[in-house]
Amino acid sequence: EPLRIDVISVIPGFFDSPLQNGLLAIARKKQYAEIHVHNLHDYGLGRYRQVDDTPFGGGAGMVIRPEPVFACVEKLLEEREYDWVIFPTPDGKPFDQPLANRLSRTKNIMLLCGHYKAVDDRIRQMLVTMEVSIGDVVVSGGEIPSLVIMDAVVRLIPGVIGDGESALTDSFQTGMLDSAYYTRPAEFRGMKVPDVLLSGHHRNIEKWRYENALQRTLQRRPDLLDKKIFNE
Ligand code: ADE
C-alpha cells in the first residue's frame, strides 16, 4: 500500500518538476508513494475562481477564503480517511526527524498550502489537524515547506532509498549529526583521508565514525546532545 499524499495549492504547477525528478519521482514510479496535487482555484468562487479576499479589520495582504478550502478538503475527506490534515505555517510545531518518521508510517496525509497573507482562521480551527513549521524563517507559501515535508517523509519509506544510502545513519536519526565522509582519492592536494577508513577494520571504522559524529555534534549542535542524554 503506497503512502498517499494530497496537496492543495494555488500554484499546483510549482510541484511539476519536484514530482518528475529525484526522490519523489522515483518513489512514485516504484509505487511507494502516490502524490496528488489539487488546484484550489478549481474550487474558487465566481467567474474568476476567486480564492482570496481582503482581511476583515484591514491591513496589508490577502486572506484565503474558507469556501474553496472547505469544498476541496471535504471532497477528499468523503473519499477516504486521512491520518493528518497538515498546514505548514511558521507558527506550527517544529518539523523534525521523529515527526518525519511518524508520518512515514501513516497511510493518507493532506498538505494544505497557505499563500498570500494568511488563511481564514476557521480553516485552521475546523479542518487542519496538525500545524508544522520547517524553521524560524518565513517563506512565501506552503509549497516549499510541503516539499520539504514530503521529501523527508517519503525517503524514510522502506525501499525508497537503497541500503547503500540507508537513512539509519542520517544526521538526527541517531540523535546526533552524521560523521564526515571521504571517497577516492586517498590523498588530494596533500590532504589525506583518515587511515582508519582505509584499514578495512570495521569495528575501528564504526568507532571512528561514532567519535567523529560525537565531536561534530559537540562543536556544531551541542543542544542535540542535551536532548539525546535526556532521552536515554
Ligand atoms: N510558511 C511560511 N513560512 C513557513 C515555515 N517556516 N514553515 C512552514 N510553513 C511556512
Image (spheres, rainbow, N blue to C red):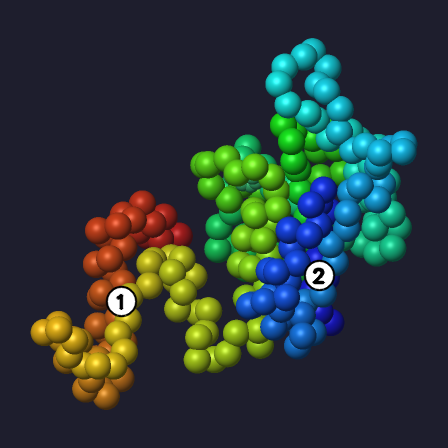
Of the four image quadrants, the one with ligand 1 is top right
Along the line of sight, the residue nearer the viewer: 125 or 226 = 125
Quadrant into which the C terminus falls: bottom left
The image's mark for residue 28 is none
In-image side of 78 versus 222 (left or right): right
Residue 164 at x, y percent in the picture: 44, 80
Q: Amino acid at mark 2?
A: Ile
Work out whether mark 2 precedes mark 1 in sequence or the reverse, and give the earlier one. 2
Quarter holding residue 185: bottom left
* 103, above or below 32, in the image: above
- Mark 1 Cα within 10 Å, few/some/many (few <14, many 20+)? few
**Helix or strand or loop: what does disc 2 sit on?**
strand
Q: Which residue is painted at 45% across and 36% down in the image?
A: 136
Quarter holding residue 180: bottom left
Which residue is identified by label 2? Answer: 35
* 25, above or below 102, in the image: below
* 149, above or below 162, in the image: above
Quarter holding residue 211: bottom left
Which residue is identified by label 1? Answer: 180
Residue 103 at x, y percent in the picture: 61, 57
- Mark 2 Cα within 10 Å, few/some/many (few <14, many 20+)? many
Q: Which residue is painted at 35% across and 53% down in the image?
A: 228
